[in-house]
Image: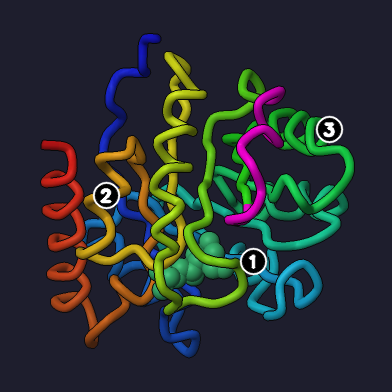
Amino acid sequence: MTLAPRLPIRIAPSILAADFSKLGQEVCDAVEAGAEWVHLDVMDGHFVPNISFGPDVIKSLRPYTTAFFDCHLMISPADPYLEAFAKAGCDGITVHAEAGPHLHRSLQTIRSLGKKVGVTLNPATPLSAIENVLDDIDLILIMSVNPGFGGQKFIPAMVDKIRAARTMVGGRPIELEVDGGITAETIGAATAAGANVFVAGSAVYKGDGIAAYRENIARLKAAAEDGRR
Ligand code: DX5
Ligand code: ZN
């Protein structure tokens, strides 16, 4: 079984943990501090027990950076809103396999909108839910917490799921992203299991401003690289 060439380590700060009173500055600071992606946690209070922000907020953030906008839709249904998030400036749109009955159609729609196609699974959802759409996606997001809130503990059982996902992907150039409870203490196991993109909210937006964010991101990257050795 050939595995895809190792994709670069990427840190994707979740702005859910940022200071909402100055989101534009917080996005700039995280990118300036070394983040490659910006993780946008969209929550509807229905699919998850929390409400965050919608496409208009993302549209207002777009001019602040050219960094990859990695949009995680924790909404159901997702299909009626895909175009709005694409137009708002998202570069990648990730939908939950659990969000509706026609996952393949949702992925086709994201592709038709010219965006990177992502699919994500809640911790209890088996990988078999996406085994038939591997040729239609660019990214798999493994939830390592139950979605809805930042600052939760990483679920250790997800390490085996990450490893199984990497094997399932085989030689396909699919980004393997992990989301929830990623810290310098947990990122190594996730990297060793085959993940290459790491969402981190509270572990990045800890301390105040760009110097702290730079230190936090550097620690995460160092721990991720250690996990690859
Ligand atoms: C949870 C979100 C995660 C979360 C990550 O529903 O999808 O992206 O904000 O926050 P931390 O890194 O603090 O667990
Ligand atoms: Zn997320």
Q: Nearer the viewer, residue 74 or 30?
A: 74
Q: Which residue is mark 1?
A: 42
**For discs 3 and 2, the disc positioned in front in the rendered view:** 2
Q: Amino acid at mark 2?
A: Ala
Please state the horizontal and vertical placement of residue 33, each as a whole percent of the image: 21, 64
Left/right placement of residue 221 relative to residue 88 reads left
Please state the horizontal and vertical placement of residue 136, each as a whole percent of the image: 66, 23
Q: Which residue is mark 2?
A: 189
Ligand 2 within 8 Å of the CB at mark 3: no
Q: Nearer the viewer, residue 189 or 58?
A: 189
Left/right placement of residue 112 relative to residue 219 reads right
Please state the horizontal and vertical placement of residue 187, each as a whole percent of the image: 27, 55
For the N terminus, the quadrant is top left
Q: Circle 3 — which element?
A: helix
Q: Which residue is mark 3?
A: 105
Q: Amino acid at mark 1?
A: Val
Residue at 89% in and 43% down: 101
Residue at 69% in and 25% down: 133
Alpha carbon distance from label 1 to label 2: 27 Å
Ligand 2 within 8 Å of the CB at mark 1: no
Alpha carbon distance from label 3 to label 2: 33 Å
Q: Amino acid at mark 3?
A: Arg
Magenta span of residues? 122-133
Q: Circle 1 — which element?
A: strand
- Asked whether residue 184 appears in the rendered view, the answer is yes
Magenta run includes residue 189? no
Mark 2 and mark 1 in contact (Cβ < 8 Å)?
A: no
